[in-house]
Amino acid sequence: MTAPSFVAAATILAAACVAPRTGTRPEAASRIRVNQLGYLPEGGKVAVVCSLEPRAFRKFVVVDERGRRVLGPLPAEPAEPFAACTSVHRLDFSALRREGRYRIVLEGVTSPWVRVDRVAYTGTADTLLRYLRQQRSGFNPAFQDSVHTRDGILVDHPTRAGEFIPVSGGWHDAADYLQYGTTSAHATFMMLMAYRDHPLAFVDVVGADGLPGANGVPDILDEARHGLEWLLKMYPEDDLLLNQIGDDRDHRYWDLPSQDSSDYGWGHGGPRPVYPCTGKPQGLFGHRNRSTGLASTAGKYAAAFALGAQLFAERDPTFARVLREKAHAAYALGRANPGVCQTAPAMAPYFYEEDNWADDMELAAAELYALAGEERYLEEALEYAGMEPVTPWMGEDTARHYQWYPWHNNGHYETWRRAAREDARAEMARYYRRGLEAVAARTRNGFRVGVPFIWCSNNLIASFATQALFYRTMTGDTTYLGVETAAVDWLFGVNPWGVSMVIGLPQWGTTPRDPHSVVAKELGVHWLVGGLVDGPVYASIFRNLRGIRLFEPDEYARFNTGLVVYHDDLGDYATNEPIMDGTANLTYLLAALSADASSPASR
């Protein structure tokens, strides 16, 4: 089977040439890490030097493609060490505003190519959609085949267990084929929000089925609609909210999605279990979650339905009307059943341990106010906002898996957009600032990162940058612009390993080549272009996970001797597995960078 060809030409820019992976010898003890996508001419520009032994650099210069000095000498600023980087220096070359390709030269150490270009981010958000299309259940355009068409059989329901519920569709959550309503609803909302706020960042080159051919609808809306249609199936009745498809019994089989042979008791490749939200602890085997209500999931569904109803009102009034009705029903269900609906474990103790729900109900209330204009929704949004002013992981050293999800609260931004009272708007901005301050206080290291390195740390990085962007939009305050930019740079190569955390982006860069994915293993990593991988974790987390091991010698072993590790290895599902919700989460940030690229305040 050939590789998929549906990615937009705009998503992989031809403006930059393929560059060497590094300008230093492989054995060099000091490496200059740069944002491999590039830097906007008017934006901040910082490279970071990671040294594996004590070094005291003083000056650096920037040279062009012909080796001519264009900037410097400038001071190499020493900074606090991080992970395996015993010595760290920051190289600020923000004064360089002329577009072009350059290298940084630092006392015998030379950087990879540095790209300064006003279109550095153009098309990148669309590139992420390539991965999301490959994750589709139902008709999958990458395989040009339908997968998981027999879903599913209702389980763990007090009266209806064993009933068939038609729920084929949606996206596989990661490299396995489990599907979760909570992550899918968040992913859908982020894509809808990205289009609403930055419509010019997206193109139309595929149809609703994901196959090549424009259909008059931006591809981001096609993908979001795919999510909405599945969420409608997962909420078939006003009092029946479905939570997930499949469980970790899926992990017994290492198949391509089009050949999935998982067996849940109804035969290989047969139907999969569909779990409802019950408001009580769930788990069919020895492990159980700690569910207490429905509001966390109901709120996410209601928010996605309500924003979808707004954006499809003119394009498809009938579809929008259905979304409107379901938004009201889901919100009412959440109001009646406060608490969290966690995902269900099976043979292993791992599940999404979401502990918060007020943020989801705030977001839903804000969107329903935008949709219906009823003042009670705005008042309820403000009430929920006060229940969780700061997303709890911010400022913490660690957290359980998906404990506080999503990692940033879109509700504060949406409430701010709709509130007329200045005191309410100012309060939403203060809430964001408190969270940003808590993370920024932990960014004294040379890479200026302050998130806890738990499983899916790249999600936290992207969410922190998104919240900082929202805060700047709301207030015009650039206090956190430096750490916002550092978070973006981290994702695209300014990290100890020098790896862009998005597969194949940029195509000339150092990106994951051996992700935890049977698709990549069997068909090639190019099938997963656009997928954001989980990201680095504390070494202690990696050592204590079940069934995790490296299949190949660790090419980053020298950079994995500290507190935090990352492995580009098929066997590492903790740091190197591409994730659907994280990828969708990133669409907003990249759309904003792309759409605002010509603005001096864009970064």
Image (cartoon, grey):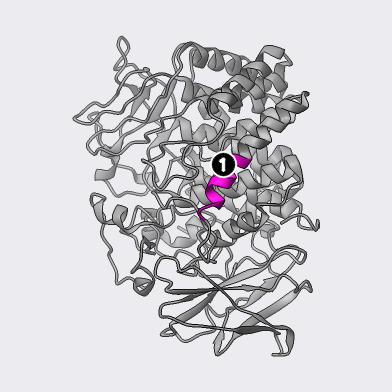
Camera-side residue: 461 or 172? 461
The span shown in magenta is: 433-442
* Residue 278: % across, % down: 36, 17
Q: Residue at x 39, y 46 (%)?
A: 398
Badge count: 1
- Asked whether residue 59 is in view, the answer is yes
Q: Is residue 384 above or below residue 440?
A: above
Q: Quadrant of the C terminus?
A: bottom right
> Would residue 434 be found to the left or right of residue 196 on screen?
left
* Residue 391: % across, % down: 52, 36
Q: Residue at x 80, y 58 (%)?
A: 600
Count residues near mark 1 (Cα–Cα under 10 Å), then give few for <14, some for 14-19, many for 20+: many
Q: Amino acid at mark 1?
A: Gly
Magenta segment, prevailing SS (helix, strand or loop): helix
Q: Residue at x 44, y 26 (%)?
A: 167
The reply to whether the magenta stretch includes residue 435 is: yes
Camera-side residue: 163 or 479? 479
> Would residue 547 be found to the left or right of residue 293 on screen?
left
> Would residue 138 be found to the left or right of residue 19 on screen?
left
* Residue 399: % across, % down: 39, 42
Mark 1, secondary structure of its residue = helix
Per the image, the residue denoted by label 1 is: 435
Q: Quadrant of the N terminus?
A: bottom left
Q: Is residue 246 above or below residue 603?
A: above
Image quadrant assignment for residue 575? bottom left
- Asked whether residue 311 is in view, the answer is no
* Residue 2: % across, % down: 49, 59
The reply to whether the magenta stretch includes residue 254 is: no
Q: Is residue 429 above or below residue 468?
A: above
> Would residue 297 be found to the left or right of residue 414 on screen?
left
